[in-house]
Every structure is written in C-alpha cells, then in structure tokens.
Image (cartoon, rainbow, N blue to C red):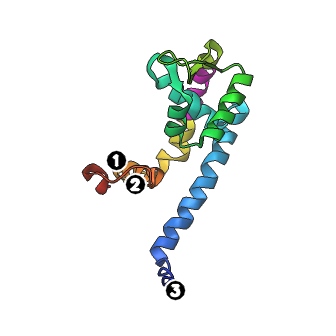
Amino acid sequence: PTSPPPPPPLTSEEQEFLRALARALVFLPRTFVSDLGREHGLSMSEYFTMMYVSEAPRERLRIGDLADATALSLPAVTRVVTLLEDKGLLVRTPTASDGRGRDVALTATGRERLALAQPAQVESVRRRIFSHLDGVDLRMATAVLTRIAEGDHVPPTPERTQP
C-alpha cells in the first residue's frame, strides 16, 4: 500500500497567520498573570472559570459544562476548580437535578474576589487587546476565533460557514 501524498506546504500568508496566532497564545496568558495575577492572585484559567460560573443560572455549573465553556479538558478544569476550592472561592455541590453529578458554585468570597478583579481585567484587555483592534470587525474576528476553538467538536451550520 502506498501512503497518501504529503499535504502541500503552508502558504506564506498561512505561515504568517499561524506564527501571529502562536505568539498571541503565549502572550495573552503571560500578560494576564502580570496584570491580574499579582494583584488578585488569579490565573487566566481561574478568572474565566469563576466568570463562567458567575454567569450561569443560580451561579451553578456542572463540571462538564464548565469544561465545555472554558475549552479546558475535564481533568484540567477539575484541577482549576480544586485550586479555587483551596482558595475558598468555589465549592462543589451535588447536582440538584440528579444528585450524581457535581455542580460548581461561587462562594461569597469568590463573588467578592471576582468583583474586585473585574475592573482590572477590563482595563487589561482594553489596553492589551482592544486598543490594537481599531478598524477590525470584531464580529468577524469573534466568528473566526470561535470556529478555531470549536475545531472538530461542532459540525458546520449555515451560520458557522461564514465568518
């Protein structure tokens, strides 16, 4: 049996995009820690985990749904939840609907910490991201990033075929 031919090399435009994306993926978490981590003691994963829980109905979210929302693997989101539990910011409780699953909920301390961190997070993303996007169509950019983040998990639909 013959092996399939190798894929064609990336175009220079594709290489340029890939390199810019790779730099952004390294840059953003590092700057997040520098802007928010020192002052509020939260990593990017911890902050967004708390944010998603705070936005959920009754401020409760199943661990699997939290993994989907954050795009973290189930083991990774479990580690983040454990770190936040150890800091007294989240608590795991039995799921009300079936009792077998586990929900994650913010504690009063978690709500306070998130409220204190949000202004710094807003200032950081405005300065480090949005101030560089003048003239960029944010809806289009959001659609592109969403398609990349969804990967093979979500089949294309008519609204997802156009950025």
Alpha carbons under labels 2 and 1: distance apart: 9 Å
Residue type highlighted by circle 2: Val
Tell me which numbered mark, 3 or 1, is placed earlier along the sequence.
3
Task: Please give left or right for residue 47 compared with residue 61 in the image.
Answer: right
Residue type highlighted by circle 3: Pro
Residue type highlighted by circle 1: Arg
Give percent across and percent down for residue 89. Answer: 66, 21
Magenta-span inclusion, residue 77: no
Tell me which numbered mark, 2 or 1, is placed earlier along the sequence.
1
Residue 154, placed above or below residue 44? below
Residue 13, placed above or below residue 97? below
Choose top left, top right, bottom left or bottom right for residue 99.
top right
Q: Main secondary structure of the magenta part?
A: helix
Q: Nearer the viewer, residue 153 or 50?
A: 153
Residue sitting at x 62%, y 36%: 77
Q: Which residue in the structure is indicated by mark 1?
A: 139
Q: Which residue in the structure is indicated by mark 2?
A: 144
Alpha carbons under labels 2 and 3: distance apart: 38 Å
User: Which-is-in-front pick, marks 2 and 3?
Assistant: 3
Q: Which residues are magenta?
A: 113-122
Magenta-span inclusion, residue 120: yes
